[in-house]
Amino acid sequence: MRAASLGLAALLLPLAWGYAVHWAVERLWPVNPSRSANATPRSGSDDSAGMPDYQI
Amino acid sequence: MTPELAEFARLAPLGFLVGAYGTLVGAGGGSVLVPALLLLMPYESPATITAISLAVVFFNAYSGTIAYMRMGRIEYRTAVLFTLASLPGAVVGVLLVHELPRGLFDPLFGGMLLLIGGFLVVNPLGRVAPVHGGARPVGHSRRRSLAGAVGSSYLAVFASLLGIGGGIIHVPFLIRVLRFPPHSATATSHFVLTFVALSATLTHVAMGEFARGLSQTMYLAVGVMMGAPLGAALSLKLRGSLIVQMLAVALCLVGGRLIWRMF
């Protein structure tokens, strides 16, 4: 019973918590529009060191 | 030489290497440290080794994060979001680890990590994303940050089940799923790892699994805290693809260890 409860918690809690935290951070710490607009995902490029303005 | 000094001379250099490597790839180094400690300290139980490793990962991540902060490579909003998302999962994983039928999960997890590691060695960065000149839709960014929060939350449970900090899983997730640049991914992952490893370590302490190994942890911590800034500095000199490949080796190590444990 304890294992089943923990298993269920491990499945559902991360989903609910991830949504809740995202919702809270979106409201308390909104994305800076200028930085977000200029952020470019340069995955695949190897010259991305020192890229502090990357913001998703 | 006293036994304590001999142990320090043995563990501090190991910590230094683990600190440099872990920070370089954005992980805590637990993937390398656990097998090394199992060899060096065969008299300790796996639970104690895991607890020591997680505490050392915390010191490594803490020191590496300070170095990355000085370099201005951490994206704080994303890092705080993923940290908050990860914390409960790390605790749930520690609680769940005793309930799992290891005979089933170890080979399953091990095989999965080996596959991912092998895939990343061959194809470290994936398809090259086109470099956009203009703005991206905000919704797209929101979806990715939501995916990052939920994904980080699940990854924390998974990492905690494996007894590792989770950097070796989080960094590929940031790079391949969320399309982070590799150097930004390692720094952000390190920030998250500091708090995740701390919460997992405190959970181990609360469960009484840290009764032994405090002195060994401190000896290793001295080493990792000196090695971490070196790893952060070295990472600037390496290509992103090489960093991912080095990380993939750590993934294969953890996967191989899980499968090895069956025999």
Image (spheres, rainbow, N blue to C red):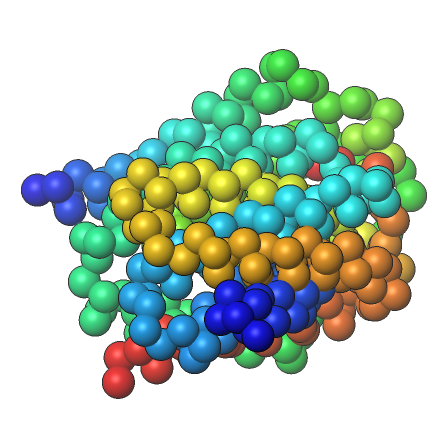
Q: How many marks?
A: 0
Looking at the picture, does residue B137 appear above or below residue B127? above
Whether residue B111 can be seen here:
no
Query: Which of these two is toward me, B19 or B174?
Result: B19
The single residue placed furthest to the front in the displayed view is B1
Looking at the picture, does residue B155 appear above or below residue B50? above
The x and y percentages for residue B244 are: 68, 67
Q: Is residue A55 left or right of residue B195?
A: right
Instruction: Determine the residue positioned at 88% across, 65% down.
Output: B237
Quarter holding the N terminus of chain B is bottom right
Q: Is residue A40 left or right of residue B117?
A: right
Q: Which image quadrant for residue B142? A: top right
Instruction: Determine the residue positioned at 52% across, 31% down.
Output: B84
The x and y percentages for residue B65 are: 70, 44
Looking at the picture, does residue A2 appear above or below residue B34? above
The x and y percentages for residue B117 are: 54, 73
Q: Which image quadrant for residue B111? A: bottom left
Instruction: Determine the residue positioned at 34% across, 34% down.
Output: A13
The x and y percentages for residue B221 are: 59, 55
Quarter holding the C terminus of chain B is bottom left
Whether residue B228 can be seen here:
yes
Q: Is residue B81 left or right of residue B73?
A: left
